[in-house]
Image: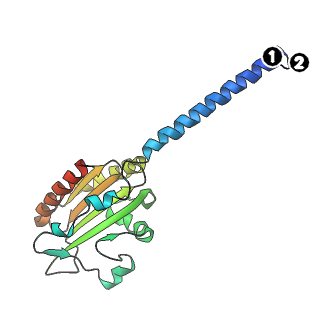
Amino acid sequence: MIPVHETGTVYKRRIAMKKITALSFTLAMMFVLSSGFAIGKFKTDIIDKVRLADTEIPEGFMLGQIPGPAKVVFKGNPWLMDRNAIQKLTQHIYPGGDYTKVSQIHVTILANREKPFSDDIVCYVILYKDTIAAKDELRKFQEFVGYNSDRAILLPKDNLAVFLLVDDVKDFHYIQEMAGTIESRLRDQ
């Protein structure tokens, strides 16, 4: 029913405004719902499912010991990093690493038994905040791994990256075996 004081033109404008408002609301809802898909498949619990187990440490290696000065940042081994460590170390894990896009990082450092304070093999499990952040960061990561393909392996999936690195190329076969094990775990997820 048209109010008595409104003319036909005013009524048509009001209807047009309602349609524009409804369209704007619909578009906003579509944006919100579609951005939900950027959240990412994996949550923090994936880290425990894919990280290296103590039984997967190659013969002749052990969990590395953290030297005194490094204990300021590295609180343990293996270790789910705190925000302070993520902020300080992300750019050192791979060039251009942006800690603001990282949700969690788990690190396992393996050392040759003869050098317990070394970092001969390192496994990082990195969970990004969402798939958009992961896409941006994985591009940087893949470039880095491409230049170091004789000593680094990257296993990306959705908003997760598993990064294996060896100091000495003669130990590369160890991370190849580890990567196979981790890849099979990722397939099950």
Farthest right residue in view? 5
Q: Depth-wise, is mark 2 or mark 1 nearer the camera? A: 2
Secondary element type, mark 1: helix
Check the image and report above or below for 12 versus 95: above
Disc marking residue 4: 2
* Near-viewer residue (117 or 12): 12
Residue 166 shown left or right of residue 11 in the figure: left
Please state if 72 lies on the left or on the right of 180 as rendered.
right
Q: Earlier in the sequence, mark 2 or mark 1?
A: 2
Q: Is residue 179 left or right of residue 99?
A: left
Residue identified by numbered label 1: 9
What is the number of callouts on the image? 2
Q: In this view, does 71 lie above or below 97?
A: below
Q: Where does the N terminus fall, quadrant-wise? A: top right
Relative to 126, residue 122 above or below:
below
Please state which amino acid type lies under the numbered disc 2.
Val
- On the image, the x and y values in percent for residue 118 come to 22, 77
Q: Where is residue 61 in the image (x, y as percent from the top left)?
A: 14, 74
